[in-house]
């Protein structure tokens, strides 16, 4: 190759290299200004939408900082919505899943035993994580149940969309009053909690 052609080849290669560097730097800057969302999905053929736009269930997306929402759907499964918030440069991982409705559940489990086991594992993990979050956020849960001869205080599902409700089991007003006074004595104002009264079994 003569010197002139060699110089042209070197210049072209240098130009390509420079362009690749610029693209790489630009991509890095772009991604650093976004939030990174990494997802997996069970069942594998479920439809996943992020802010109304369908995305691959298993993959990586870059989104603007702020609030976003996943919507997961599949025929014969219960739709699930997952709101989240992300910051620029932050990475969040989501093990997404939805559960079959009662009618289709058994049939789907029979036809997809491996995915059913995977789904069961994800549901168990979410249950454990939710329990840990609740106990970390609400000190009172570590004190329950509180058992007395007149009452029993435990926690259960809220009827108003809160994290939990306090369940006071007492046979009469004396027991209910004693339970409320006990909560106050322990430093918990009953006004701050959803309270559901039940009768002893």
Image (cartoon, rainbow, N blue to C red):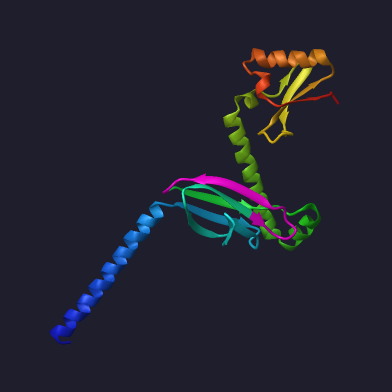
The image quarter containing residue 44 is bottom right
x then y, percent, for residue 49:
60, 57
* Residue 121 is covered by the magenta coloring: no
User: 200 or 16: which is nearer to us?
Assistant: 16
Please say whether residue 149 is visible from this viewpoint: no
Q: Is residue 193 left or right of residue 12?
A: right
Query: Which residue is at 77% across, 55% downward?
Result: 105
Range of residues picked out in magenta: 72-89
The image quarter containing residue 165 is top right
The image quarter containing residue 76 is bottom right
In the picture, the quarter occupied by the N terminus is bottom left
Q: Is residue 142 above or below residue 86?
A: above
* Residue 75 is covered by the magenta coloring: yes
* Extreme residue in the left direction: 3
Query: Which residue is at 56% across, 60% downward?
Result: 58
Q: Is residue 165 above or below residue 26?
A: above
How many numbered discs?
0
Query: Which residue is at 40% across, 55% downward?
Result: 31
In the picture, the quarter occupied by the C terminus is top right
Query: Which residue is at 50% across, 58% downward?
Result: 60
x then y, percent, for residue 172:
84, 16
* Extreme residue in the bottom direction: 1
x then y, percent, for residue 177:
76, 14
x then y, percent, for residue 130:
62, 39
């Amino acid at each position: 190759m003569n010197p002139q052609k060699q110089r042209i080849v070197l210049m072209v290669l240098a130009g390509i290299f420079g362009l690749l560097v610029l693209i790489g730097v630009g991509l890095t800057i772009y991604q650093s200004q976004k939030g990174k969302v990494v997802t997996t999905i069970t069942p594998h053929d479920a439809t996943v939408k992020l802010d109304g736009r369908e995305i691959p269930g298993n993959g990586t997306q870059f989104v603007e900082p702020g609030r976003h929402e996943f919507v997961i759907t599949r025929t014969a499964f219960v739709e699930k919505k997952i709101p989240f918030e992300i910051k620029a440069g932050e990475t969040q991982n989501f093990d997404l899943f939805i559960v079959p409705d009662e009618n289709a559940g058994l049939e789907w489990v029979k036809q997809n035993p491996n995915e059913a086991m995977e789904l069961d594992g994800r549901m168990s993990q979410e249950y454990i994580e939710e329990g840990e979050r609740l106990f970390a956020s609400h000190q009172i849960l570590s004190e329950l149940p509180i058992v007395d001869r007149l009452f029993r205080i435990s926690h259960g599902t809220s009827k108003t969309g809160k994290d939990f409700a306090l369940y006071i089991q007492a046979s009469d007003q004396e027991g209910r009053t004693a339970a409320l006074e006990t909560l106050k004595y322990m430093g918990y104002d009953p006004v701050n909690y959803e309270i559901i009264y039940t009768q002893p079994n």
